[in-house]
Amino acid sequence: MTSASRWTVAPDGGRPDGRSCVHLGAMSTPSDPLSENCEECSALGFGWMRLRWCTTCGHVGCCDSSQGRHAYSHHVATGHPLVLSLAPDEHWAWCYVDELFLISAPTTRGSAV
Ligand SMILES: [Zn+2]
Ligand SMILES: [Zn+2]
Ligand SMILES: [Zn+2]
């Protein structure tokens, strides 16, 4: 099942207007997360707060509020720019390169931005 959701930069009052993410066009979701948990944390016996899912390769790592920050270290190691949040109450992606939140624009609304 493929969902063709459009992604857009999330409005954020704390950031200058007009910034955009050059990776938006390449935004896609891998078929499945490679793991259910942060495997690096599991190996180290760490706990984690929330999980981030690399949209490039499907790697699952813990967020920057977690002890291991493995999603970030995955970005540093691989250069993969975008992670999706796997937290059920969070519906956004983060671009490490442009340092922007991205949200998926519902296509049903038909809002042209
Ligand atoms: Zn970007
Ligand atoms: Zn971790
Ligand atoms: Zn990756």
Image (tube, rainbow, N blue to C red):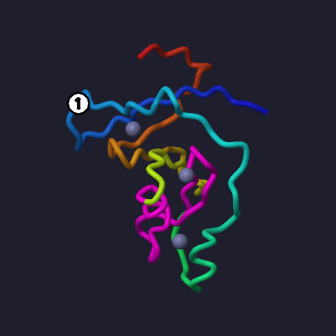
Residue identified by numbered label 1: 17
Residue 89 image point, x, y percent: 57, 53
Q: Is residue 59 magenta?
A: yes
Residue lying at 68% horizontally and 54% vertically, measured from the top left = 33
88 or 59: which is nearer to us?
59
What range is drawn magenta here? 51-76
Q: Is residue 6 left or right of residue 22?
A: right
- Secondary structure of residue under mark 1: loop
- Amino acid type at circle 1 is Asp
Q: In the rendered image, which quarter is residue 47 located in?
A: bottom right
Mark 1, ligand 1, within 8 Å: the answer is no
Horizontally, is 11 left or right of 50 in the view? left
Residue at the spot 57% in from the left edge and 44% down from the top edge: 56
Residue 21 in the image: state x and y as whole percent.
37, 33
Percent x, y of residue 81 = 44, 45
Membership of 74 in magenta stretch: yes
